[in-house]
Each structure stands twice: as structure tokens, then as C-alpha cells.
Image (spheres, grey):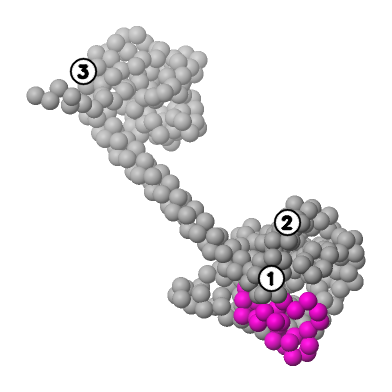
């Protein structure tokens, strides 16, 4: 015989009654099948119910001195730790209104005294079976929720890594460092949070939209992968012909993202914003930008946000071929571009939080070693 076979623990029943004779009667009835705990008042019953492990079911008298059974049940159901314990009222109160009140408080059953032992045992057994089923389903739901959360986190992590990998690919082609990606992400987020204080933008700039902006911002220059080195890395001013070719990076970026989305076979929210940003962040409020010469609110909001963030970072950042501009000078230039280069609302929001932009720039500043490493990398890769 297998002496290691484990039998399931019997269920624990808490009997609450202020009359010792009733406690003795119920204990004698239940103890052959169940583990029985007893309480002579409501306060002790609550302490036992809140202990670990809690009882599996409670048989509760109503008429008790101090805290009556109704109040005990009310408190049990108000406490997340005890609200799922089934309560059966066991009472001499036999009125319909009494029973209705007990069931309205959350009791699963209502048995009047004097009791019929077979009926009490049958109802206890049935409610324990129902509780076991409910516990199983609840545990299964919690497990599935945990697994879904885990898988979702993995998908999001893979998504974020993929975005940064794509953005870093573009970054290897020009003089920007990886910190440019981080800075522009945080600039766009800070600007969007400030802008949503304006009533006409509050509904659009909700938390999800801003998160998608933050995720898609690194892809704003992905199209630079397709620009020839002789143009992309030229330290001096571009010729008109070279500039026309440089401008195609917006279309190249949009088309690359669109191709990736098409291969997925379904629209993806953050890729929609990424396409808007990549294609339109070089547009200007007055219509003098590219690639389409869009004007005013015809320019997508996401692209207007990126336009200001990208220009600010270009002004203040050191590059292989230039020193960064002081923050105050960059602020003045952006302010001067209000209503021309930039959406007036964007500039007003920027001016209100420009110190936050400066703090972001300092947090992700390009160090001397990063600038030098970038110079050496470009020299090796492009034979400069």
C-alpha cells in the first residue's frame, strides 16, 4: 500500500452563534466531515475570517448582542480578503423581509431554526462545491491574466527593441549619436503633455496617444538610410540638386514603415504615427517646408510636435562638424519661428516648459567620448 498518498484537507467551517448550546450542536453535526471553528460574537468571527488561511464557509447567526449577524456579513463583504467566503445565515428569524435582507447583504443561503440536520449538511456541501468551482475559475482567470500580461510585456519589449534597432540603423549613417533619439522622444512627450492642457487638444492627446508618439518618435529619420553618403555626410552647404535628393528621406522613411506595416497584414497604431512623423516633420507652418508644402493644421499634429523637437535638438547638440548652440539662443530662434516654421500653439507650449527641454538635453548629453567615437566610426565606415 502507498503510505505516501495524500488526502485532501477537509474544508473549514466557521460557526458564529452567541448561544453555547447552538455552537455545540453545530460542531457535533459538522466535525465528522469538516474542520470546525467557533465564535461567540461578531468581533471574534471577523478576526477568524481575516486570519490565514480563512474559513471556506461561515454559518452565521443574526441575533447576537453587540454586532448582529447582518453587520458581520456587511463587513465580510466589504473586505476584499473575506468577501468571497460564502455566508449562510442560520437563525430563528423566519420572516420574508429578514431573509431578503440577509440575501441582499451577500449571503448565499438562509436557513431557519430549528434546523434539519440533513438539510443543513446538504446545503453546506452544495455551497462548498460551488465555492470550489468559483475558486478554480478565479484562479484560472488570474493565471490567464498573468500569462496575457506576461506575453503582452514580451511583445511590447520586442516592439520597443525593434523600433530602436531600426532607428539606430539610420543613426549609424549620419552624425547624430544615439542620444538624439532619446532626447527627441522625451521632448515630444513633454511638449504633448503641456499641449493637452489646451481644451481643443485635450481629447486627442490622451495617455495612449502620447505613448504612441513616444514609441514612434525614434523613426523620424529612418529614411536617411537611403540617402547617399556624399550628401548625407557633406559638412558644407548642399547644392540645390543635392538638397532635392536629401529631401527624399521623408518619402523613403514613410514608404519603409508602410512596407513593414503591409507585411504585418494589419494597421498598427504607432506605425501610423511613425509614418506621419517620418513623412511630414520637415513641413513648416507657413507652407514653406517639404515634401508636400503642407500648411497649418494640414500638417499632422504628430509631425508638428516632432518638427519643433527635432529643430531644438539640432540647434543645441554638438556634432562631429559643429559645436552646440546655447539653450537661450535656441529658445530665441524657435520663438522667432512662431507662426512661420512652427505651429504657434507648439511654440507657446515650448516657451512655457523650455527649461524642461534643457533638462532633458543635459540628461542625455553627448559626451566627448561619444562624439569622438562617432567621428571615428564615420571615418571607418565611410572612409572620410
Residue 265 relative to residue 278: left or right: left
Q: Nearer the viewer, residue 62 or 257?
A: 257
Asked if residue 142 lies left or right of residue 206, the reply is left
Q: Earlier in the sequence, mark 3 or mark 2?
A: 3
Q: Nearer the viewer, mark 3 or mark 1?
A: 1
Which residue reaches farthest bottom? 241
- Let me know if residue 131 is in the magenta part: no
Which residues are drawn in magenta? 219-247
52 or 159: nearer the viewer: 159
Q: At 57% from the left edge and 64% from the top edge, which residue is drawn?
A: 165
Q: Gap between marks 3 and 2, in whole Å?
A: 78 Å
Compared to residue 307, the image places residue 183 above or below, namely above
State the separation of the CA atoms marked 2 and 1: 15 Å
Where does the N terminus fall, quadrant-wise? top left
Look at mark 1 in the image and give the residue it sits on.
379
Query: Would you say residue 381 is visible in this rendering?
Result: yes
Residue 187 appears left or right of 135? right
Residue 331 position, x and y percent, is: 87, 64
Q: Nearer the viewer, mark 2 or mark 1?
A: 1
Q: Which residue is mark 3?
A: 32
Between discs 3 and 1, the one toward the N terminus: 3
Question: Which residue is depicted at the point 86% across and 69% down?
Answer: 334
Report which residue position mark 2 lands on.
369
Judge the density around disc 2: few (<14), some (14-19), many (≥20) Cα neighbours within 10 Å. few
Amino acid at each position: 500500500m502507498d503510505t505516501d498518498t495524500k488526502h485532501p484537507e477537509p474544508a473549514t467551517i466557521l460557526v458564529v452563534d452567541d448561544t453555547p448550546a447552538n455552537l455545540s450542536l453545530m460542531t457535533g453535526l459538522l466535525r465528522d466531515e469538516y474542520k470546525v471553528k467557533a465564535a461567540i460574537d461578531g468581533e471574534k468571527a471577523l478576526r477568524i475570517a481575516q486570519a490565514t488561511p480563512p474559513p471556506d464557509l461561515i454559518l452565521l447567526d443574526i441575533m447576537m448582542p453587540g454586532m448582529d449577524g447582518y453587520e458581520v456579513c456587511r463587513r465580510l463583504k466589504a473586505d476584499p480578503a473575506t468577501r468571497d467566503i460564502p455566508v449562510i445565515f442560520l437563525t430563528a428569524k423566519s420572516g420574508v423581509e429578514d431573509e431578503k435582507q440577509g440575501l441582499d447583504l451577500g449571503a448565499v443561503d438562509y436557513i431557519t431554526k430549528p434546523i434539519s440536520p440533513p438539510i443543513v449538511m446538504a446545503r453546506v456541501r452544495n455551497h462548498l462545491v460551488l465555492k470550489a468551482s468559483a475558486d478554480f475559475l478565479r484562479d484560472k482567470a488570474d493565471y490567464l491574466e498573468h500569462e496575457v500580461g506576461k506575453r503582452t510585456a514580451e511583445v511590447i519589449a520586442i516592439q520597443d527593441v525593434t523600433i530602436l534597432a531600426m532607428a539606430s540603423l539610420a543613426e549609424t549613417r549620419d552624425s547624430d549619436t544615439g542620444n538624439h533619439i532619446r532626447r527627441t522622444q522625451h521632448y515630444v512627450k513633454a511638449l504633448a503633455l503641456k499641449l493637452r492642457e489646451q481644451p481643443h487638444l485635450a481629447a486627442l492627446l490622451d495617455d495612449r496617444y502620447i505613448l504612441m508618439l513616444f514609441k514612434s518618435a525614434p523613426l523620424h529619420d529612418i529614411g536617411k538610410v537611403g540617402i547617399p553618403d556624399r550628401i548625407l555626410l557633406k559638412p558644407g552647404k548642399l547644392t540645390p540638386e543635392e538638397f532635392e535628393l536629401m529631401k527624399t528621406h521623408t518619402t523613403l522613411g514613410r514608404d519603409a514603415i508602410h512596407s513593414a506595416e503591409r507585411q504585418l497584414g494589419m494597421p498598427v497604431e504607432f506605425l501610423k504615427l511613425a509614418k506621419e512623423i517620418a513623412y511630414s516633420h520637415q513641413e513648416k507652418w507657413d507652407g514653406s517646408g517639404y515634401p508636400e508644402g503642407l500648411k497649418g493644421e494640414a500638417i499632422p499634429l504628430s509631425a508638428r510636435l516632432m518638427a519643433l523637437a527635432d529643430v531644438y535638438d539640432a540647434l543645441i547638440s554638438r556634432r562631429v562638424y559643429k559645436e552646440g548652440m546655447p539653450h537661450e539662443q535656441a529658445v530665441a530662434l524657435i520663438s522667432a519661428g512662431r507662426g512661420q516654421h512652427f505651429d504657434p500653439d507648439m511654440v507657446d507650449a515650448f516657451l512655457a516648459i523650455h527649461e524642461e527641454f534643457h533638462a532633458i538635453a543635459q540628461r542625455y548629453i553627448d559626451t566627448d567620448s561619444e562624439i569622438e567615437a562617432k567621428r571615428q566610426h564615420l571615418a571607418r565606415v565611410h572612409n572620410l
